[in-house]
Amino acid sequence: MYIIKNALKCIGRSKGRNILIGVIVFVIALSACLGLSIRQAAESAREETLKDLKITANISFDRNAMMSEIGAQREEGQKFDREQFSEKMGKMSGLTLEEYKKYATAETVKDFYYTVTTSLNGSDGFSSVTTETGENESTANNSAAPEMPAETRGNKGVGGFGRGGIGGGMQGDFSVIGYSGENAMTTFLEGTATINKGSVFSEGTENYDCIIPSELAEFNSLSVGDSVKITNPNKEDEAYTLKIVGIYTDSSANESGTGFMGMTASDPANQIYMSYNALSKIIAASEKNATTESNETTGRESSTKLNGQLNAAYVFSNVEDYEQFANDVIEMGLNENYTVSSSDIEAFENSLIPLNTLSRLAGYFLIVILLIGAIILIVLNIFNVRERKYEIGVLTAMGMKKFKVALQFLTEIFVITLAAVILGAGIGAVVSVPVTNALLENQVAAQSDRSERIEQGFGRGQKPDSAKTEMQSPPEDGSFNPFGAFMGTNNQNAYVTEISSAMNFTVLLQMLLIGILLTLIAGAVSMLFIMRYEPLKILANRD
Amino acid sequence: MAILKLDNICFSYGETEVLKDISFEFESGKMYCITGKSGAGKTTLLSVLSGLAKPTSGDILYDNKNIKKIDRYRFRSKYIGVIFQSYNLITKFTALENVVLSMEIAGVKGIKKKKKALELLQSVELDEKEANRRVLHLSGGQQQRVAIARALSYDPEIILADEPTGNLDGETQNEIMNIFKALAEKGKCVILVSHSPSIANCCDVNYELKKINA
Ligand SMILES: Nc1ncnc2c1ncn2[C@@H]1O[C@H](COP(=O)(O)OP(=O)(O)OP(=O)(O)O)[C@@H](O)[C@H]1O
Ligand SMILES: [Mg+2]
């Protein structure tokens, strides 16, 4: 008990020295606190985002892997084997619905849905929204439009894995998308799209009911209950009549404006939604009626059937499930040419890049600070003990055991360190959020700069504003996410730019541990010195 | 019966032999004076007696027990009160704090330490104002008296004093000597080191240390 009393008295009696030690420890503590807070913030941000992260994944053909495989075979100076590539790509077919469904039985899958997308033309005055003049419109509608170059058409039959996106054959005026269920209609679930007149077609219906965008309704003076006629762009006389049951608006579509040159169908205003069952009935009917014709110049055969691009999405409640699924599907027999990918994960990882970089820097900073801190404390303590040699001699001569003297010194260091650590943590708690955010801002700026440079390095330049509906552009990472187009998941530059809290119980505990650790290191050194001292010698020296 | 007995004590600082075959006996209730020329080894003997220094050979018996078998710290803090020639006070503490601290180290219980310490300091002519002054700001004589008060604070059986009156004027010197006398009368064993003949005369027994010449 008196040891503590003595320690406190001693602290009070040597204010100057102790304030100096305190200030040094305070600076160390504050820096350590900032470092720890930044690390904690990164960790919490990760956890928080992960917690609410609903992951939607696709199984897609790993074109990237195949390209590098072909690339690897190529010898020095030889050109990329395009022939082989298109041949291989041609052989690869998209997974069938049965296969998709099979993988959906994996335990981790929380939700599963799929869509089929095809391209159809309007007829009987039903025309697509376009800014082009009527002349161009008719060109787009013209079944005798010039053939696409063979390379672009190489994806024919691949069903959604090529650049063209929507099947082979002719590009129609409209994108017609058939949804497996309401859970597939993500834009409606997310609230960006809403029905403002009528209602959605009933789930799973085989009736040719559809909902159309309000722009399209306006453009064609259509209202709920009207019917429209659509035709196969490859075969004009193949017509189907759709009944409009609802008119919707998609707020995310407004940003994108019109489609790209000649890509009317990709304009969100020209997207007709219906039930999967209904649309697959149309596709099946078209296959039945299909005729095959041979192209005179290329010699390739092409069918007039409608090509449905099938997309399936698996929903997981967390990352572990998603990762488990990626393993499970291989066991369930998924070909190695396919990969499970999720743009949510990539977007998530990307969003954390600046914070993680900051966290890593903070980690290094922390190590340096603690090393320097430990060294400074050790040196200060050696000075302290040497300076107080006589006092130690007197105390031991008075019959105070050495370890008790050492304990008193330890208490002194501990009290000073604790006070400084508490002060450091307190001020750290106040400043850590703004400091972290300021540092993060720099980091985000640096990161954005870097990715922009990389983009430019790849010759991509600035991303268009309409990235969200940029269906025709090649995916930037090589893995094509067909859902990204209408799910609005293009989060490429959505970095975590702000943290709300950095200091928490963990950080406080860590600070305390650091304080104790520093005290123990410093204390051990003084202990060593005190144990070495012989009172007789010390006191004799003073005589 | 002797409370403290030295049996053929030898002590040397490395090569330098300072004490050789010292066999002294000290009894309770008596005052002893150890005399000798400067450098004869008086302070050294005191260090050996108080357990600060271990004799090179020979035994010290406290109450017929070899002090090798007693915890040296306990011996120093409880059974023996030492007034060092150089006082050895904690200079940043006040006189009062020094006295109280020594009681705490000795583990004195059941009394009001502060009150007892003030009484002790008063008995060596230090008033409350001086008692609450840091040792650093006390005169040499005052420091010496604090050292005496401290040595008496835990009521030890043996009191060792190295030149306890060296810095004191005649009058104070007498008062201090009276304190020592009173302690001896109360049954304590008082051992003084001094070259002052007047002090030697006050004592019951005189031991003389001879300087060893190589
Ligand atoms: N730590 C030490 N190392 C080596 N020699 C020492 C040490 N301390 C004392 N001595 C030597 O031992 C001898 C005895 O010293 P001591 O201090 O015991 O003398 P003293 O009789 O107390 O003298 P004084 O009357 O001047 O106080 C001296 O010759 C001194 O030089
Ligand atoms: Mg001496």
Image (tube, coloured by chain):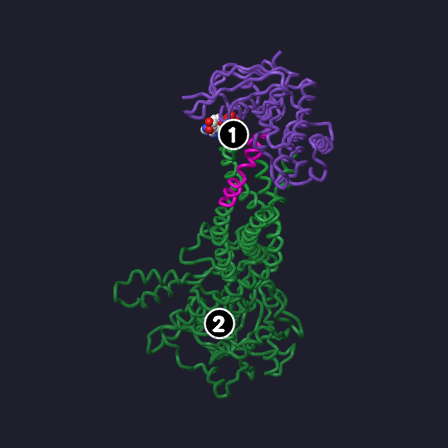
Chain colours: A green, B purple
The amino acid sitting under disc 1 is Leu
Q: Position of residue A271 (x, y in %)?
A: 55, 74
Q: Quadrant of residue A1?
A: top right
SS assignment at label 2: loop
Query: Tag 1 or tag 2, which sits nearer the N-term?
Result: 2
Whether residue A43 is visible, yes or no, is: no
Closest to the camera, between mark 2 and mark 1, is 1
Q: Position of residue A407 (x, y in %)?
A: 58, 36
Question: Furthest-top residue in view?
Answer: B1
Q: Position of residue A172 (x, y in %)?
A: 49, 77
Disc 1 Cβ-to-ligand 1 distance below 8 Å: yes
Report which residue position mark 1 lands on. A536
> Which of these two is toward me, A16 or A404?
A16
> Which of these two is toward me, B120 or A184?
B120
Q: Which mark is residue A471?
A: 2
Q: Which mark is residue A497?
A: none
CB under 8 Å between callouts 2 and 1? no
Q: Which residues are magenta?
A: A378-405
The amino acid sitting under disc 2 is Met
Magenta part, dominant SS: helix
Q: Are marks 2 and 1 on the same chain?
A: yes
User: Is residue B19 magenta-colored?
Assistant: no
| Label 2 – label 1 distance at C-alpha | 89 Å
> Which of these two is toward me, A395 or A495?
A395
Q: How many marks?
A: 2
